């Protein structure tokens, strides 16, 4: 399945046996912890059954002397013969079983928790690694909050189920088998009465599971929507404040949150029926055992039963029935968490079943060192919506040349550059680097040679030093400083409170736009790539700083092939070739002087920037008006 037009939720629906896959694919290396958890869990439950059993036997054999002292699974030879010894023996067995149960419970929680945390860690890491390699089209189509919710909430839900609930489910099973076995050993007829609720409870639980399954899938997807909304709003807090749209956003968050509440409530409501229902069932078992056992003890065996029932046996029955109450009612939580975890696992596997289209093809060659010749050969391109954005783009940049791309907004300049490192693949024609089609070399080796300073200069939360050295992790402090100097960043960095060790904040919020751009340029200078793309790299700096950066960029671009996108035409004035792009096509090409002489789009744009509005051609003004109204229409339709 490719990264476009796919939704982890929808894909998740077709994932078969998600929980089995979770265990085999991610739990495999840690199964020993699971096995220890399983064994100690069972042991703890078995041990918890010992005191009521011994109490019943002690009542009948030690206190009332009604029957012989025997215990299931224990050889008679081990049992003392005097009543006093039997009394102390009973006390010892109860004491030891209680202590052992506590030890087993400790081992159970530790090992199951370790298992669940390891699985969570593996799932989260694998999901992130996979997601990170998906195509840009996937990220264009999926909201950050939705993806964060898979990485965080879904992974946490798995852990919750695997540690506590998995243990509870196992314990319940052991308890029912253990109690069933012991009750049948003591009195099979009365055992039928007590255990008659088990099939009813199983049917009730099955009904409940079917009902809540659908609800949980809805809950997960509405959490994703809510997260997306919250994340979007926090990211755009400045816009919200400056637009005074707090009330509007209050309403949007309220509605996303209400949707989540509604779905969650639907699932919870089912619980409100299930839990008391289970409690009622165990109470029925208790009452039936008490009535049938009581009548049996006081009069003749009821319901056609035969034999003798001792008071101690009845007490053991009643205590065992009581023991079932808590785990049985907890069953709802187990099922609940199971459904929750299953929905999360499905979403995770849904995501993992999406595969990137942009990968290194089989037989792709490593692009070791390059000279830097770039050819765009009749390149066409359309994004996911299928609308053609680039059409028949053909040009060549020789090693060391600088190509300037200019043109109105939305013309396709950034798209042309994004095709070079294969952020997207061409839909027609081809792009070659040193004669190799970019699709025939490994993606990693291709990208290693390309430095990209984009419009949105993104800095990672960390220090200035870490951000400059991002990608060149073993750079020395001197190299980092030299790169910062070349990007005209050194001076402002040394004026920051902690110099190069100043933390830049999330996305670099503690720095100005121009400062962020300079750090980003320093990062590229340090990486020293053979091919360079500067997409509006100096748009956020003032003219004076631009002049300074320009000097260093001139040095940087001198001996490497460079693509410069700039609205400020002075930035591309010195380029070897300037391409004017309009509606996805190259409409003219040449040097600054030649294009001015040509008196076309470039010359008009130049006049706009020089303030010579009166000298603009009528054609250009008409086109600019058309473009502006088209962009207003599309903005309007987006709202
Ligand atoms: N990820 C995307 N998905 C769909 N369409 C896109 C995407 N990115 C850009 N576009 C569309 O492709 C066209 C070209 O966009 P591009 O960013 O290449 O233009 P540009 O010339 O660089 O504009 P600007 O100067 O404003 O940066 C526009 O119509 C834009 O709406």
Image: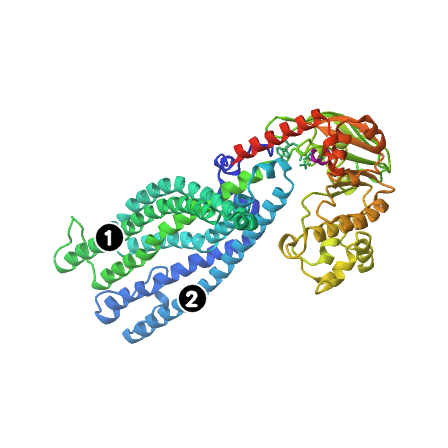
Residue 495 lies, in percent from the top left, at 74, 63
Visible residue check, residue 433: no
**What's the mark number on residue 532?**
none
The residues tagged by marks 1 and 2 sit, at their Cα atoms, a distance apart of 28 Å
- The residue under label 2 is 102
Residue lying at the far bottom in this picture: please name it: 84
Looking at the image, what colour scheme do you see? rainbow
Our reading of the magenta stretch's main secondary structure is helix
| Residue shown at 42% from the left, 49% from the top | 337
Query: Could you say which is closer to the camera, residue 14 or residue 404?
Result: 404
Visible residue check, residue 504: yes
77 vs 190: above or below: below
| Residue shown at 25% from the left, 55% from the top | 187
Query: Could you say which is closer to the camera, residue 268 or residue 452?
Result: 452
Instruction: Please provide the residue range marked out in magenta.
Output: 414-418
In the image, residue 576 lies in the stretch drawn in magenta: no
| Residue shown at 76% from the left, 34% from the top | 607
| Residue shown at 63% from the left, 45% from the top | 129
Residue 321 falls left or right of residue 392: left
In the image, residue 415 lies in the stretch drawn in magenta: yes
Mark 2, residues whose alpha carbon is within 10 Å: few (<14), some, or many (≥20)? some
- The residue under label 1 is 285
Mark 2: is the Cβ under 8 angstroms from ligand 1?
no
| Quadrant of residue 359 within the rendered picture | top right
Q: Quadrant of the N terminus?
A: top right
Query: Could you say which is closer to the camera, residue 483 or residue 624?
Result: 624
Q: First in sequence, mark 1 or 2: give its number.
A: 2
Residue 510 lies, in percent from the top left, at 65, 57
Q: Quadrant of ligand 1?
A: top right
Secondary structure of the residue carrying tag 2 is helix
């Amino acid at each position: 399945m490719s990264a476009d037009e796919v939704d982890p939720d929808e894909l998740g629906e077709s994932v078969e046996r998600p929980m089995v896959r979770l265990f085999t694919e991610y739990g495999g290396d840690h199964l020993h912890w699971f096995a220890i958890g399983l064994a100690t869990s069972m042991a703890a439950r078995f041990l918890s059954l010992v005191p009521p059993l011994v109490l019943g036997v002690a009542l009948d054999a030690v206190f009332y002397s009604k029957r012989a002292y025997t215990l299931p699974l224990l050889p008679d030879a081990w049992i003392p013969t005097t009543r006093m010894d039997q009394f102390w023996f009973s006390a010892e067995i109860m004491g030891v079983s209680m202590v052992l149960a506590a030890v087993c419970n400790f081992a159970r929680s530790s090992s199951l928790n370790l298992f669940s945390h390891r699985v969570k860690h593996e799932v989260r890491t694998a999901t992130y690694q996979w997601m990170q390699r998906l195509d840009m089209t996937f990220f264009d189509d999926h909201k950050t909050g939705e993806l964060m919710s898979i990485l965080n909430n879904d992974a946490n839900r798995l852990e919750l189920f695997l540690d506590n609930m998995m243990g509870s489910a196992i314990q319940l099973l052991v308890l029912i088998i253990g109690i069933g076995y012991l009750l049948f050993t003591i009195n099979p007829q009365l055992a039928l009465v007590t255990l008659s609720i088990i099939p009813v409870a199983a049917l009730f639980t099955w009904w409940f599971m079917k009902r809540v399954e659908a609800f949980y899938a809805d809950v997960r997807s509405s959490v994703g929507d809510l997260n997306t909304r919250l994340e979007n709003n926090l990211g755009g807090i400045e816009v919200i404040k400056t637009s005074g749209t707090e009330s509007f956003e209050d309403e949007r968050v309220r509605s996303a949150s209400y949707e989540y509440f509604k779905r969650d409530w639907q699932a919870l409501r089912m619980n409100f029926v299930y839990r008391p229902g289970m409690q009622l069932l165990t109470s029925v078992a208790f009452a039936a055992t008490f009535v049938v056992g009581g009548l049996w003890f006081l009069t003749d065996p009821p319901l056609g039963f035969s034999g003798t029932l001792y008071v101690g046996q009845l007490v053991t029955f009643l205590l065992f029935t009581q023991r079932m109450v808590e785990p049985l009612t907890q069953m709802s939580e187990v099922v609940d968490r199971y459904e929750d975890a299953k929905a999360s696992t499905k979403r995770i596997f849904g995501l993992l079943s999406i595969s990137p289209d942009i990968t290194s093809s089989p037989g792709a060659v490593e692009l070791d060192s390059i000279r830097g010749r770039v050819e765009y050969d009749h390149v066409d391109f359309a994004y996911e919506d299928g609308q053609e954005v680039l059409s028949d783009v053909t040009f060549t940049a020789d090693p060391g040349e600088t190509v300037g791309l200019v043109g109105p907004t939305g013309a396709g300049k950034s798209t042309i550059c994004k095709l070079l490192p294969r952020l997207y693949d061409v839909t027609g024609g081809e792009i070659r680097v040193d004669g190799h089609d970019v699709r025939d070399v490994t993606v990693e080796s291709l990208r290693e040679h390309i430095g990209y300073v984009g419009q949105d200069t993104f800095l990672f939360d960390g220090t200035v030093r870490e951000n400059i050295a991002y990608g060149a992790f073993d750079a020395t402090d001197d190299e980092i400083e030299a790169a910062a100097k070349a990007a005209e960043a050194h001076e402002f960095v040394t004026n920051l409170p902690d110099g190069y060790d100043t933390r830049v904040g999330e996305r670099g919020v503690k720095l100005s736009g121009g400062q962020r751009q300079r750090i980003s340029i320093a990062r590229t200078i340090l990486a020293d790539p053979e091919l360079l793309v500067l997409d509006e790299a100096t748009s956020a700096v003032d003219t004076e700083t631009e002049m300074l950066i320009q000097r260093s960029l001139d040095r940087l671009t001198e001996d490497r092939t460079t693509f410069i996108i700039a609205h400020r035409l002075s930035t591309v004035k010195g380029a070897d070739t300037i391409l004017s792009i309009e509606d996805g096509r190259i409409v003219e090409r040449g040097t600054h002087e030649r294009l001015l002489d040509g008196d076309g789009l470039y010359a008009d744009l130049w006049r706009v920037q020089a303030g010579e509005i009166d000298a603009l051609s009528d054609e250009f003004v008409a086109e600019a008006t058309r473009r502006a109204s088209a962009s207003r229409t599309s903005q309007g339709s987006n709202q």
